[in-house]
Amino acid sequence: MAIFEDAFIKVKSAVDVAGEKTGEWVEISKLKIAAARQSSEIADRFEALGKMVYNASKAGGVDHELIQKKVEEIDEMYEKLGEINERIYELRNVVQCPTCKAVSPKEAIFCSKCGTKLVGKEEKKEDPIQEEKSEEPSDWQPPVDPIDPTVSNPNDEDDMPQ
Ligand SMILES: [Zn+2]
């Protein structure tokens, strides 16, 4: 990790000399460092997860819940890495092919490597909190059929913790 720190310091001092013009380049460099750091962290997590599974398997019991948690953590880190890369592509005016991951100029209609159509590609929709929805009066109840057979029994849990 120290290598990245050093690179970052060198980039910074270069900017101090060159001035504002390199602002965008610096931003890209910073993002690249962040992406490299994130990749390295993901690799560490994979190693830790592997060790954890190995040790648990030797000990005779694998905690699937814990593994699932670790897998989700890695997924989140991949997502963050993807966001960093997207910002880099944006600054570099390129787009990444969703199929082969090659980069093409932003104006490109088709991927130069595999020919996948790049325009009109699906935008990632992220709306974790829908604040607009809380406009309804608090005492409002959805119409529910009192004998609705689809309503599940809350006591019907079979995965209760032991
Ligand atoms: Zn492609």
Image (cartoon, grey):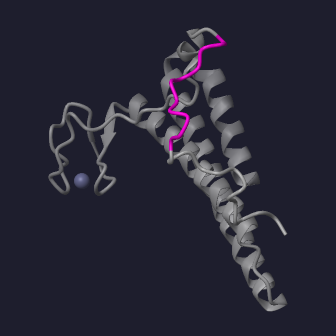
Identify the residue at image location x=18%, y=57%: 114
Which percent across, then down, holds residue 70? 70, 61
- Image quarter where the C terminus lies is bottom right
Is residue 93 placed above or below 150 in the rendered structure?
above
Percent position of residue 78, x then y: 56, 51
Q: Main secondary structure of the magenta part?
A: loop
In the image, taking residue 69 as reference, residue 102 lies left or right, namely left
Is 25 magenta? The answer is no
Q: Nearer the viewer, residue 112 or 21?
A: 112
- Bounds of the magenta segment: 138-148
Q: Between residue 143 and residue 138, name the one nearer to us.
A: 143
* Farthest front residue in view: 147
The structure residue drawn at horizontal position 53% and vertical position 21%, both measured from the top left corner, is 23
Q: Is residue 108 left or right of residue 140?
A: left
Viewed as shown, does residue 147 lie left or right of 60?
A: left
Q: Nearer the viewer, residue 41 or 63?
A: 63
Question: Which residue is pictured at 55% across the width and 22% down the height?
Answer: 130
